Image: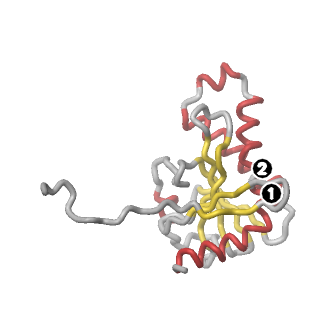
Amino acid sequence: MSASEEEQDRVMGILEPFLERIFPIFPAAMAKYNEEYPAAVRAEHENRTAAGCVYDHVWTGFKSEFMEDDGFHFLHVRGLNVLNIRDEVVIRAKKVDANGRHRNHDSKQQQDFDRQVALPDMPPAAIRLVAGYEPDVAFSEVQRVMIRRPLIGWVSQIIEATENPHWVDITPQELPYVGQRGAAG
């Protein structure tokens, strides 16, 4: 087992008791956006506005679900909203693609977060993660909920089940480097 796989097992072990509470936050936020915002208003939204609205509902959902739990702290660090879980992991919510990568422009704060840089008021030893939702093409429902470790790149999909929600490794496989690009043969 590689160091990355060992880290994934350890981190997802920390999160496993909370998966059944984390997963529904994302589809509920998407449903709220699609059901409670008038269609005429949603039609005027750019992609970033729609994603921002869903993000706000996800963040509120995290607060509603975990505010009273011991060891859960909601931080606003240099422009980032993060959920600190027992100083072991710190989570940011994001809209992501099929590989669990966020697609917006990287701010300095986001780059520092992804690189595991020590940030003020954030526990230095905590692993920084992205909890992401992959929307369908119509932005009408959530296809998947994932936990991704930025830069190292492992990705876990949360599998919602009526009993025993769990996670599976969906880390994309990288193609091996085989030589010069564009070389004539």
| One can see residue 113 in this view | no
The quadrant in which the N terminus is found is: bottom right
Inter-mark Cα distance, 2 to 1: 6 Å
Figure quadrant of residue 39: top right
Callout 1 amino acid: Arg
127 and 78: which one is in front? 127
Residue 139 locus on image (x, y percent): 62, 34
- Residue 42 placement: quadrant: top right
Question: In the figure, is residue 175 to the left or right of 53?
Answer: left
Q: Amino acid at mark 2?
A: Pro
Q: Nearer the viewer, residue 168 or 13?
A: 168
In this view of the protein, can residue 91 be seen by the observer? yes
Extreme front residue here?
Answer: 185
* Residue 73 x, y percent position in the rendering: 75, 66
Residue that appears at 59% across and 28% down: 45
Does residue 141 lie above or below 150 as drawn? above
Q: Which mark is residue 21?
A: 1
**Residue at 50% in and 65% down:** 153
Viewer-nearest residue: 80 or 142: 142
Give the number of the disc on residue 97. none
Q: Secondary structure at mark 2?
A: loop
Residue 141 horizontal/vertical position (percent): 68, 38
User: With 1 as the anchor, is 131 left or right in this view?
Assistant: right
Q: Are marks 2 and 1 in contact (CB under 8 Å)?
A: yes
Q: Secondary structure at mark 1?
A: helix
Report the residue at 20% width, 62% height from top: 180
Instruction: Give how far across and how far down residue 55 sits, in percent.
Output: 66, 45
At a point 56% along the width and 49% down the height, the residue shown is 96
**The C terminus lies in quadrant:** bottom left
Residue bearing mark 2? 24
